[in-house]
Amino acid sequence: MAKRVVIAIGGNAILQPKQPAEFDIQMQNVRKSAEQIAKIEAMDYEIVLTHGNGPQVGNILQQNEIAKDVVPAFPLDACNGETQGSIGYMLEQSLKNTLRKNQSSANVATLLTEVEVDRNDPAFQNPSKPIGIFYSEEEAKQLQATKNWIMVEDAGRGYRRVVPSPMPSMIHGIDSIVHLLEQNIIVIAGGGGGIPVYQTNEGQLCGVEAVIDKDRTGRKLAEQVNADIFMILTDVSNVYINYGKPEQEKLQDISVTEAEKYLSDGHFSVGSMGPKIEAGIGFAKTGGTAIICALDEADLALQGKAGTRISYAS
Ligand code: ADP
Ligand code: MG
């Protein structure tokens, strides 16, 4: 039986930090990612693909800000949905074209994904994720007063809106995802961490302005679709201890216990590698293997020849 893998690709796979955010440039990057994903498909895996949206949703927020007197700005949850559509389109088309070139019979579908969060998540009491553009102190005060935004001063660069970053508690549409996987269809889902929604007391879904970490959503997806492997593709070939120091050391196969120890010893940065390791540990605890590696070594990492693997008993 084909093994099932959930693959999370980082922002870099779509737009590198210093590149202009033009559509053609993003598309070019995405095509390279699609070639890697197609290689994995050719190795007979069922694939769920998820992706970040940091730079893209940032640009939508900036467009909203510039055009707000002409076109009403949509809330953050709707902006996330927009990026699931635009990034999903780029990934889906690139993948279909690559699969066709490779004479693969697999197909691709993008699913708009709502991800439920718990209204009592402590993150709602402590919004911490900065989003959108920088504002002056005066603008910040006004936004706080008129829109109830929480504004925070950011390292002397100005004021920025912060939103909660709650944990994903349940991903909607899992039955559809699994059904598509069984039909030889690669599924793109949970983009940008998913559209955050909560259930009202009447059991209705309602969007909420928050950002869910894409590595956490990836882990939840991997658990809910019963994946064998959860892969996080990023811009480093391995996870390291003492990263960036002369004595840095590459990690290859590690156990959950080792990973937990390195995490508590502070080897992984809070905003970048930390969430990946936490997500990897969480998934490995449910019995699967978590892999963190570079995008262009994904096929090798699946064969145990590259990357960092976390499993229960390594
Ligand atoms: P993505 O967009 O893929 O989520 P991030 O920038 O959030 O990428 O995370 C990847 C980055 O994590 C790497 O580029 C690296 O600079 C950083 N990093 C922090 N600590 C470590 C570590 N211990 N080992 C490897 N990379 C690390
Ligand atoms: Mg990241």
Image: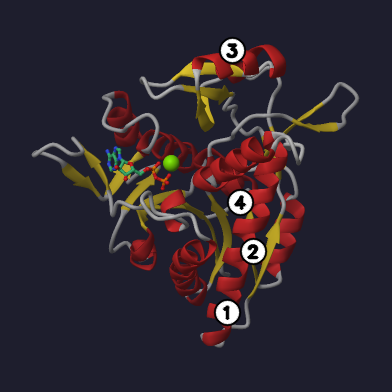
Left or right: 188, with 299 as reference point: right
Q: What residue type is labelled 1?
A: Asn
Spatial separation of the CA atoms under disc 2 and disc 4:
26 Å
Residue in the picture at 55% in, 48% down: 56
Instruction: Return the residue at label 4.
Output: 226
Badge nearest the viewer, 3 or 1 = 3
Question: Which residue carries the number 2 mark?
Answer: 89
Q: Nearer the viewer, mark 2 or mark 4?
A: 2
Q: Mark 1 points at which residue?
A: 97
Quick check: 253 above or below 157?
Answer: below
Measure the alpha-carbon separation of dots 3 and 4.
47 Å
* Residue matched to label 3: 141
Q: Does the residue labelled 2 lie within 8 Å of ligand 1?
A: no
Rendered image quadrant of residue 111? bottom right
* Amino acid at circle 3: Lys
- Callout 1 touching callout 2 (CB < 8 Å): no
Callout 3 touching callout 4 (CB < 8 Å): no
Q: Which of marks 1 and 2 is nearer the N terminus?
A: 2
Residue 83 vs 241, above or below: the answer is below
Q: Where is residue 216 in the image (x, y as percent from the top left)?
A: 53, 38
Beta carbon at label 3 within 8 Å of ligand 2: no
User: Mark 3 vs mark 1: which is more N-terminal?
Assistant: 1
